Image (cartoon, rainbow, N blue to C red):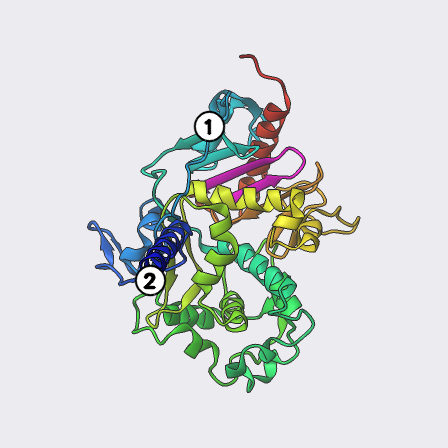
């Protein structure tokens, strides 16, 4: 009897120890803060671009959130044996054609707050400016949308979604919406068309999610499911679609409903655990605790880790949950008739919210509204994560300067460096 108790104690101890070592996806609910930073930033202007340097890393001051601690046993990214001093790299300024150093482009042209360059999974360069700190998560806003599409592709691969079926098949609460019956899951994931929303509807959508303080928030799903809400045509969107819209929250609802799990937890279990995030993560919610499509917040390093996860998926397909067809779709050569994206090389086009980059093959990027971006070069095994506050949303000058930055770093990585 004593021996059995001893064995049982050992089993329980081992179980508890193992459970403690497994990364957890238990998000804790965090109530919104006082809704104000300092004297001038409040709930009505916190998303204005001139305030984003301060507000994007303090988003839970303005809205409720779900917060996750760093993964148990996560290790900090390692530094490469020979770091690259990117500020000193010479380049041509795409705005005036003059020779500049890359540091000038980052600070004066892109308004960059943080840069992380990973090569073969190690830090080649890292820099922070303007109050951004390495350990703080920052709100991604519309740069979250491609990650939702990635989760959708994974859900299809795992049998949770069917690409050619109607969205309403997976969201019973929207069965009475005739405008959605012909919208397939695949079409929503690709995001090349979106519903034609009037400006007043977009304002109501933002208010329903709690992004503004004009009226009490009704809750995002209540707003999305109102009768006649989706009785409007689908139209082609600008590429990439820098501004978010209700279609994104429809996708967020689809993912949570089809997987029978909260969106933040789904993201954690499918992607975050495998990237072994090393800093806190948050996801903004509406007043009812429903995660919002534009609400993900990550540290720059953890944003870069997601790019590394995508890169590794192409090399280690058998060990990745990211379907091979999705990676191949992102990297496949463009057709000769692909529309031009001002500021990016010919052949650049949107695919599932990601930007397939023309010119040099096998390059893709997530590009957010004001310069937040994640660049992945599959051939060079290079990942570049950027947090920026460029003053104009999606301007060609922003895209051209980002492309020049990626190109210069790419070339520097390919050239042998002196010890």
Q: Residue at x 59, y 46 (%)?
A: 310
Magenta stretch: residue 379 in it?
Answer: yes
Vertical arrangement, residue 91 with respect to residue 341, above or below: above
Magenta stretch: residue 58 in it?
Answer: no
Farthest residue toward the right?
336
Q: Which mark, by number, is residue 1?
A: 2
Vertical arrangement, residue 190 with respect to residue 335, above or below: below
Residue position for label 1: 79
Residue 33 in the image, given as x and y percentages of width and height: 24, 59
Q: Which mark, by number, is residue 120?
A: none
SS under mark 2: loop
Q: Main secondary structure of the magenta part?
A: strand
Magenta stretch bounds: 371-387
Left/right of residue 209 with respect to residue 329 in the rendered view: left
Q: Residue at x 67, y 40 (%)?
A: 345
Farthest residue toward the front?
1
Comparing labels 2 and 1, the label whose residue is closer to the camera = 2
């Amino acid at each position: 009897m004593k021996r059995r108790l001893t064995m049982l104690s050992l089993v329980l101890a081992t179980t508890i120890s193992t459970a403690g070592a497994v990364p957890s996806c238990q998000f804790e609910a965090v109530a919104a803060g006082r809704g104000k930073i300092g004297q001038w930033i409040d709930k009505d202007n916190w998303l204005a671009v001139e305030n984003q340097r301060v507000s994007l890393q303090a988003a839970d001051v303005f809205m409720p959130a779900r917060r996750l601690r760093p993964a148990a046993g996560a290790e900090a990214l390692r530094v490469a044996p020979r770091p690259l001093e990117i500020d000193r790299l010479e380049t041509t300024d795409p705005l005036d054609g003059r020779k500049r150093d890359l540091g000038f482009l980052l600070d004066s042209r892109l308004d960059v707050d943080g840069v992380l360059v990973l090569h073969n999974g190690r830090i080649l360069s890292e820099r922070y400016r303007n109050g951004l700190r390495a350990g703080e998560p920052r709100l991604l806003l519309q740069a979250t949308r491609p990650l939702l599409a990635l989760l959708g592709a994974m859900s299809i691969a795992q049998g949770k979604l069917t690409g050619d079926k109607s969205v309403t098949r997976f969201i019973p609460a929207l069965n009475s919406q005739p405008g959605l019956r012909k919208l397939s899951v695949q079409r929503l994931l690709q995001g090349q068309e979106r519903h034609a929303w009037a400006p007043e509807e977009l304002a109501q959508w933002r208010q329903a999610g709690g992004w503004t303080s004009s009226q009490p928030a009704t809750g995002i799903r209540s707003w999305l499911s109102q009768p006649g809400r989706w009785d409007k045509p689908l139209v082609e969107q600008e590429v990439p679609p820098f501004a978010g819209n209700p279609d994104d929250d429809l996708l967020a609802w689809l993912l949570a409903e089809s997987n029978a799990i909260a969106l933040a937890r789904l993201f954690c279990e499918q992607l975050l655990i495998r990237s072994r995030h090393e800093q806190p993560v948050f996801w903004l919610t509406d007043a009812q605790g429903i995660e919002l499509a534009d609400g993900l917040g990550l540290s720059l390093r953890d944003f870069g880790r997601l790019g590394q996860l995508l890169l590794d998926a192409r090399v280690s397909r058998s060990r990745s949950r990211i379907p091979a067809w999705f990676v191949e779709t992102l990297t496949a050569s463009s057709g000769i008739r692909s529309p031009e994206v001002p500021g990016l090389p010919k052949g650049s086009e949107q695919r599932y919210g990601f930007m397939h980059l023309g010119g040099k093959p096998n390059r893709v990027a997530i590009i957010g509204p004001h310069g937040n971006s994640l660049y992945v070069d599959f051939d060079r095994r290079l990942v570049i994560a950027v947090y920026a506050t460029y003053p104009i949303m999606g301007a060609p000058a922003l895209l051209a300067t980002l492309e020049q930055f990626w190109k210069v770093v790419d070339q520097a990585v390919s050239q042998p460096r002196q010890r």
